Image (cartoon, helix red, strand yellow):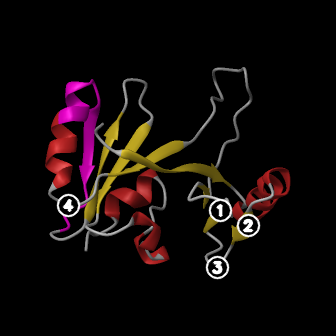
Amino acid sequence: MIAKLDCTVIDCPDPAALAAFYGAILGWKVDASDPSWVWLNDPESSTRIAFQKAEDHRPPRWPDPRHPQQFHLDFSVGTRDDLERAQREVTGLGARFLHDSGGTTSGFRVFADPNALDLPFYGTGRSTAARSPAHAPRGRNARAGRPGA
C-alpha cells in the first residue's frame, strides 16, 4: 500500500447545496463552516466527501466527452518525509509530478494519473482529519499557490 484515501473532492458552484443534496441521500452530516469547502461526514465512520467551490465550474454533460465528469482524490501518507517514498512509487506506476507545496514539516505534492486526474498526496505528521480549513486544498489552480506549513 502506498497511501490511504483521505477523501473524494467534488468541484461545484454551490458546495453547501450539493453537500445537502448528498447528505439527504446518505443521511450524513454537513459541515458548512467554510462555504467554499464543505464537508459531508458519515456519522458512523471516518468516510467523508468534500465539496469545493469552483467559480468557473463547467458541469459535466455525461456522456458528452466535451464536458467530462470532474473530481479528484486526496491521499494521505503519514509524514512529510513519506512524500518522497510516495512520489517514487506513484511515478513508478505512471503518475506525472505536477507540484510540491514546499512545506518543511507538512505539505502536499500533486501528481496527475495517466488520465490527467490530479492526485494530491499529503504528508502532515498528524491525522488529515485535523487539517484546518486554512490548510484544505482549494482546487488545481489555487492548490499550486498554497504554501506548505
Mark 1–mark 3 distance (CA, rounded to whole Å): 13 Å
Task: Name the front one of labels 3 and 4.
Answer: 4
> Which comes before the other along the chain, label 1 or label 2?
2
**How many other residues sit within 10 Å of disc 3, few (<14), some (14-19) or many (≥20)?**
few
- Which element is circle 4 on? loop
Give the number of the disc on residue 33.
3
Give the residue type that dot 1 points to.
Asn
- Which element is circle 1 on? strand
Q: Residue 20's quadrant in the figure?
A: bottom right
> Which comes before the other along the chain, label 4 or label 2?
2
> Which comes before the other along the chain, label 1 or label 3?
3
Name the residue carrying label 1.
41
Task: Name the front one of labels 4 and 1.
Answer: 1
**How many other residues sit within 10 Å of disc 1, few (<14), some (14-19) or many (≥20)?**
many
Give the residue type that dot 3 points to.
Ser
Mark 1–mark 2 distance (CA, rounded to whole Å): 5 Å
Mark 4–mark 2 distance (CA, rounded to whole Å): 30 Å
> Which comes before the other along the chain, label 3 or label 4?
3
The reply to whether the magenta stretch includes residue 100 is: yes
Q: Position of residue 142 (x, y in %)?
A: 42, 60
Task: Name the front one of labels 3 and 2.
Answer: 2
